[in-house]
Image: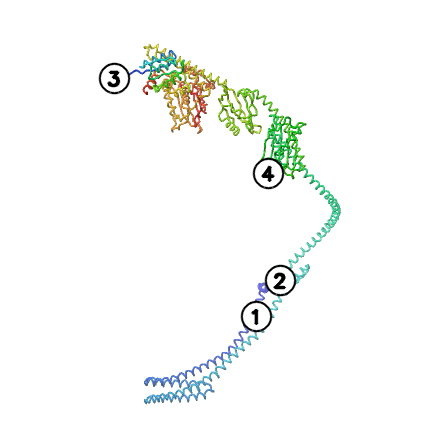
Amino acid sequence: MPKKKKKAKILLAEDDKFISLAYKDGLERSGFHVIVANDGVEAIKKFKSEKPDLVLLDIIMPQKNGFEVLEEIKKSKKQKNIPIIILSNLGQDTDIKKSRELGASDYLIKSNFSMSEVVNKVKKYLDKH
Amino acid sequence: MYWKKIKSFWLSRIGIKIVLASLLVSVMVVVNTYFIIARNLKEQKNSYTEVYNSILYLSKAFEMMESFDHQRMFVEQYVYEGGDQTKKDRYIKEKKLFNKIFKNYYNHSCNDIKPLLIKTKDKLNEYNHLLEEIIFLYDKNVDYDLIKEKFIEIDKVEADIHNNYLHKIILHIKHNHIEPAENNILTITQKTIEDILISNIFIILLSVLLGFLVSYSITRPIYALLGAIRNVSRGNFDFKINIRSHDEIGELSFAFIDMAKKLKTANDKIKEYNQNLRKEIHIKTQKLANALEALKKDKKELEEQKLATLNILEDVSESQKKLQILNNKLKRREFELESLKLLNEELTTVFSIEELLDVVSKYLHQIAKNSVCFFAIRDKLRDEIFVKAYLFQPISEKVFKEIYDEFFVYLKKKKIFSKMSKDNIQLVLNGQIDNQSQQYPKASFILPFKVSNNFLGAVHVSFLNLKKARFEYQDLIKAIVASASIALDKLQTLILAQHSRTESLINSLLNGVIMFDKDSKIVFVNPAASSFLGLKTIPKNLDGLLEILPIKNLKKIIQDVQKKGKLIFLDDCQIQNRYYELYIVPVKDYGRKNVGVAFIIHDITQRKQIEKMKSEFVSITSHQLRTPLTAIKLFSDMLVNGNIGNLTKKQKEYVNNIRQSTERMIKLVNDLLNISRIESGRIAINPQPVDLIELIESVIESIRPLSNNKRVKIIFNKPKRKWPKINLDQNLIRQVVNNLIVNAVRYSYDGGKVEISLHKYLSKYILIKVKDYGIGISKKQQDKIFQKFFRTDAAVKHVADGSGLGLYVSKMIIEASGGKIWFKSKKNKGTTFYVMLPFSGMKPKKGDRNLIVN
């Protein structure tokens, strides 16, 4: 009997209510299990406890911003290689560069990417991993 | 008549005469000789005949002798050849023959010889008897010896005959016949010669006479002519020649007479001319004589004048000598004046005290090469006293100190400076201290720099060479010092005035200004700079400042600026929580010489803050705007995709409208962000090798949905050969190309065409051409096309939405890349856009921002 494919767990760190709802809906619709964190601290906590397969990380968040979260996540030895996609509306070069330096796998500007495009990216990075 | 003519012509010729005369003579000679010879030859003939006959006799005699010999021979033969009868017969024949011959001979001989002949005959008969005896004996066959005896007998008789008879006969012929005849011939010949000679002598005499006659006929007229010539040569043209002959000489004389006549007339003319000439000469000579008299008078006068002049010259030469001396003095003075003039000129060009001292020392050096000068000046600007020593010759330290002390004493004594002590004097040395040097001052003097009773300083000149320590130079040195004093005073005043002006100006600036001189000493720090740097005291020099300015390699940068004379701009210097821009500039004087370096400090903290604020604002705004936009987009996407249930057609349409508007807003936000970044000038340019053809094709491909929608055909006229890759920023150039092609398509009429082509332009640039046949741009609106947010009315009508930022951004990008963008358009006909970029491509530019690609 073929093993039932386990649903991939995705941690979504996003402070905006609507956007997090939209992404959660879209991702779940695509067959992913989504865990939402509404601020930086929560994101770190849930990362450690839930052990997701991929992280979608916003930058502008209360408590701690996305970069700080990224740094924190990358410290953990076990979950260092989990793909982290930055989903932000900041588009400055410096931000992209910084995120890359801190170990993000990709950087997407929310307003430029449609849901399906985001989903594809997620799939891509999950497959890679 | 004919004969007379011939006679007169030919016989008158001298040549003919001579010929005839000689002919006559030779004829006479010949005829004479002939006759004489003819006569004598006849006589000779007889003698020859005589001789001929004698010879005949002689031959006959020989014949006989021969026959005689033959007889014997035959007998011998008969005897010795065995009695051959033929021989005997022959002997008998021979004997008969001999007798015949003898008879003949006897008959023809002369009577003298006949007796001898008879005798001979007898003897011969005897001989014959003997011979016949031999024959008889032989016939009798007598003993051979007997025959031999007989032969010996015969020999004797034969010998006798030969010697006494035959021989005598021959002699007789010779003496009596031949020799006389011979003598006769000789005599005749001699006679002939004598006759010829004598007769010819007569003829010769005759011919001589004839010759005289002929020559006389020639010479007489010649002498006449000669006489006439002599007359003529003497000048006597009146003469008469009596010449009758018409031969050559006659002709000559006629010609001569002619010539003489002509000469006479010429001579007369010459005489006449001569006379006239003489008259004239006489007159002229008179005139000359008069003139000469006058000249003599003048000469006398000149002589007197000459003497006077000589006296004057003497005086002049004396004055000249005096003048020379004065001249020398003048030259010296001129030199001194010139030096002073030059000095003054140079002094007007100095802008610092150091320069002034350098100039003054240079002139002093010209006068006194072996010397040492010490200058003491108060620098009013810095309010310090400094002493500068120029050692034109190296001196020892001991001597240096001595001079310095002496100078110091003087300064103190004369109270040149107030508040002076050895401690607060700055000593500057120009020249070498050489402790081996034996030089010391042989003479010296000290002069103050004084202007209207104010002391500015002093100079101490020490001559190391006594020869030069002449007092004649003192005046010049005094003059130099006087000029220098005035210049120094002026300079100080000027410097102070300028300085205070400049100072007040700079002090009022909001920018900080710090000025260093060539030795990196701080000349000036304005209040603004002090406050910026938090300076409580002004540091003495650069090193003191470097501690406060936290800039790497600042010292090296300053040296660079000094050397190259180009300013350096340092952005972002942070000093104590404030931000500054630092300009390090070379300071040049009027002569464009570098005299130092200045720091211009510009407080840009506020600007930075504003920028930061702007940046933050943009950042926040973009984020703040984007967040809700994203949400709208996501939810409307979900609605349209039927993720939350199917929609009716109309509902779908409305949701799509929401999506489209959202897209527009997102795009607008992106555009605004891009503009903000472009205007901040912080867009990075990262050129990489880009295949333009590929890029254009890819852009065309990406907008295929749009072009298909409008049924607009995009034609790309690819260049035939592959183009090399050009260094371009992929994103930026793509933006521009995208913008132009999208515009071309959007503003075309349905079913129209857009032409894109690539060209090489002036072999240094690439040219991208995008041509459409669409709505075009009216002339009135053409100059606003590149403005922010501008869209033509026609464009708005044709295509509802558009930010009006595309061309603005494109222009910014192209111009930042060192290129040009322009267009040509006609309303309703179409528009062609041109983009020109250098082949060398875009230059990389550092920046922390990228354009957002829509």
Residue B163 visible somewhere in the drawing: yes
Instruction: Between label 2 and label 3, give the one nearer the viewer.
Output: 3
The disc, 2 or 1, on the residue closer to the chain's N-terminal end is 1
Q: Is residue A110 left or right of residue B185?
A: left
| Element at label 2 | helix
Question: Which subunit holds the residue at mark 1?
Answer: B
Q: Which mark is residue B250?
A: 2
Tell me the CA gap for discs 4 and 1.
Answer: 133 Å
Q: Estimate how packed mark 1 is, as few (under 14), some (14 to 19) or many (20 or more) residues with alpha carbons within 10 Å.
A: some
Q: Which mark is residue B437?
A: 4
Q: Which mark is residue B25?
A: 1
Quadrant assignment for the C terminus of chain B: top left
Residue type at mark 1 is Val
Q: Which mark is residue B40?
A: none
To which quarter of the image does residue B423 belong? top right
Tell me the CA gap for discs 4 and 2.
Answer: 123 Å
Residue B773 visible somewhere in the drawing: no
Give coordinates of residue B637: x percent, y percent: 35, 13
User: Which residue is nearer to you in this view: B703 or B436?
Assistant: B436
The disc, 4 or 1, on the residue closer to the chain's N-terminal end is 1
Residue that numbered label 3 is attached to: A2
| Element at label 4 | loop
Give coordinates of residue B14: x percent, y percent: 59, 64
User: Which residue is nearer to you in this view: B429 or B495?
Assistant: B429
Q: Estimate how packed mark 3 is, as few (under 14), some (14 to 19) or many (20 or more) residues with alpha carbons within 10 Å.
A: few
| Element at label 3 | loop
